[in-house]
Image (spheres, rainbow, N blue to C red):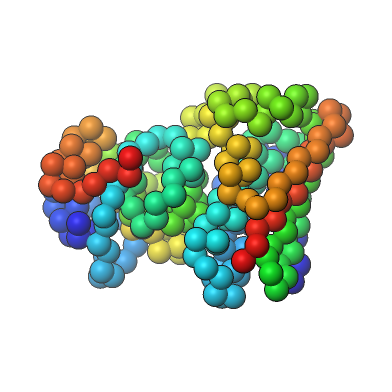
Amino acid sequence: MKLEFDIASGDFSKAGRASSRIKKMLKQLQVDPKVIKRIVVAIYEAEVNVVAHSVGGKMLAEIDGTGITVVVQDNGPGIEDIEKAMQEGYSTATKAVRNMGFGAGMGLPNINRNTDEFTIESEVGEGTVLTFRNNF
Amino acid sequence: MKLSKIIDLTNAKVVAGDTEKDHNLQRAFSSDLMSDVLTLDTEHILLITGLTNLQIVRTAEMADIEVVLLARNKTATPEMIELANETGLVLLETPYSIYRSSGVLFKNGLDPVY
């Protein structure tokens, strides 16, 4: 089963739509609620990141018999220092994003914590690709 | 703690969600930092916050939070109420501050997450 979502830059009112749809779907598939929570938190963090930091992108989710794989891809600007970005507390978020309760430098570490497999690739001027997977 | 008791102790108004459902909450967390809320491993809690935006409702949905209490006369937006009703989140508004709401609930036996 494959799902695809567009994620628009700056549109916080829509951040969470993809994670919400995926949550409903996993519930219908009667996946363990603890497993659902971990993956939807990771997806939601990734959605908020694309809305807050990028010029826009998309998310692809694929559910198979043993788990779910998610690819989140944006069209830039890319992350200059991935090692720094993965450090808890490091953030480049704007004040507006912080005022909404995000941008504390916890997103990427939290995605890492809530997933079984996680990779991040980024190129400045090109964009960022996150790939993560959780097994059921 | 039963939802009715939380409402009573904080002098709260229900603005969204099904209060008929038997909500019995063991723990609460107070924060304006949704990034922090998303790191909690405890589900079915009460979240006390001073923030009012749509992402509060989304965060609650993803983090399996059953009830959100908006402190110090903060008002839920129509979009928040609509989404909360859709996701089944109970949204409450209280005139009490975060400190007072947390204090009164803690004193009456609602445990903290940490």
Query: Residue at point 66% right, 31% down?
Result: A86
Q: Give B79 or B61, whichever is nearer the viewer.
A: B61
Tell me the quadrant of the picture where the C terminus of chain B can be found.
top left
The quadrant holding residue A92 is top right
Query: Residue at point 70% right, 50% down?
Result: A117
Query: In this rendering, does residue A45 appear at all?
Result: no
Tell me the quadrant of the picture where the N terminus of chain B can be found.
bottom left
Query: Residue at point 53% right, 29% down?
Result: A104
Q: Is residue A61 above or below residue B102?
A: below
Q: Position of residue B18 (x, y in %)?
A: 31, 66
Q: Position of residue A35 (x, y in %)?
A: 55, 61
The quadrant holding residue A8 is top right
Query: Residue at point 44% right, 45% down?
Result: B40
Q: Give A124 or B41, whichever is nearer the viewer.
A: B41
Q: Give A11 or A33, whichever is nearer the viewer.
A: A33
Q: Position of residue A103 (x, y in %)?
A: 56, 31
**Drawn side of residue A136 relative to residue A79, left or right:** left
Query: In this rendering, does residue B71 appear at all?
Result: yes
Q: Give B73 or A136, whichever is nearer the viewer.
A: A136
**Drawn side of residue A44 relative to residue A5, left or right:** left
Q: Is residue B30 above or below residue A94?
A: below
Q: Position of residue A31 (x, y in %)?
A: 56, 70
